[in-house]
Amino acid sequence: MKHPKLCMLISLLLALLLGGCNVMPSADTALLEEEKAAAVALAESYLLHITELESTLQAEREERYISESQYEKRIRELEAALEEISTSGGAPESGESSELVFHYLVRDGGAVITGYEGNHPFVTIPATLDGYPVRVIGERAFENKSLAAVVLPEGLATIEWFAFYGCASLVDVSIPDSVKEIGHAVFDGCPGVSLVCRKGSYAEEYAKSYGISYLSQ
């Protein structure tokens, strides 16, 4: 990109310097040439810096566009998958109970979920159970359950090994920033799962390291 004002300034500076050559003593010619070269070099460095900044800005704009496009595409895919599950018998039939029952134990003043009973594919885990804050999803707590989407509560710190192992229909798990530990093979056997998490969070790094699809916000 050209910068007319900066180019004009360079031209004016050169004109003044060159004009000065006609009136200044020859003894000062070398000094004038050095000053002219320094001025040109400074102007060129400004132009280079501006060009680099513009290139960086353009690259960031393109990256953001691609990221947002991928995010929107994945959202549409997840919505379609959830809709298919809902209309193909995954949701409770009329008359069936959709009550969510969580089994838990108390450890260090917090609840550790050890099991789940229910037939609804969309599960939001509460932040507290009987007044105890939910801190841990225990080992194999949701193994082989017919889940489509799970929302984990803020305040949760740990998801233990195999917690969602074998949940073949699981497509969406929302993980809060408070989660700082996710065990081995938590989402093995969940071929279509995506983790919804905050950009830069532990969950995002976990997804990257295990090759799991993720949506960072």
Image: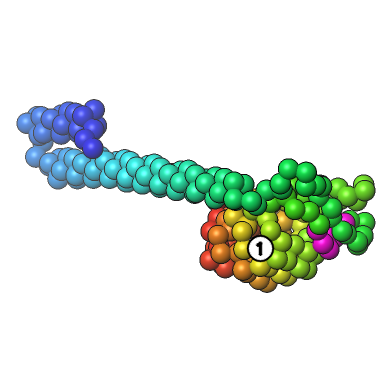
Q: Is residue 132 visible?
A: yes
The residue under label 1 is which amino acid type? Cys
Q: State the quadrant of the N terminus.
A: top left
Relative to 177, 65 lies left or right: left
Magenta-colored stretch includes residue 172: no
Q: Which residue is mark 1?
A: 167
> Which picture quadrant has residue 13?
top left
Up-down: is 184 above or below 22?
A: below
Which element is circle 1 on? loop
Task: Specify the segment rendered in magenta.
Answer: 111-116
- 162 or 67, which lies in front? 162
Tell me if mark 1 has few (under 14), some (14-19) or many (20+) residues whose alpha carbon lies within 10 angstroms of its own: many
Residue in front for this viewpoint, 46 or 28? 46
Q: Quadrant of residue 109?
A: bottom right
Quadrant placement of the C terminus: top right
In this rendering, would 19 be left or right of 174? left
Residue pictured at 46% horizontal, 46% vertical = 73
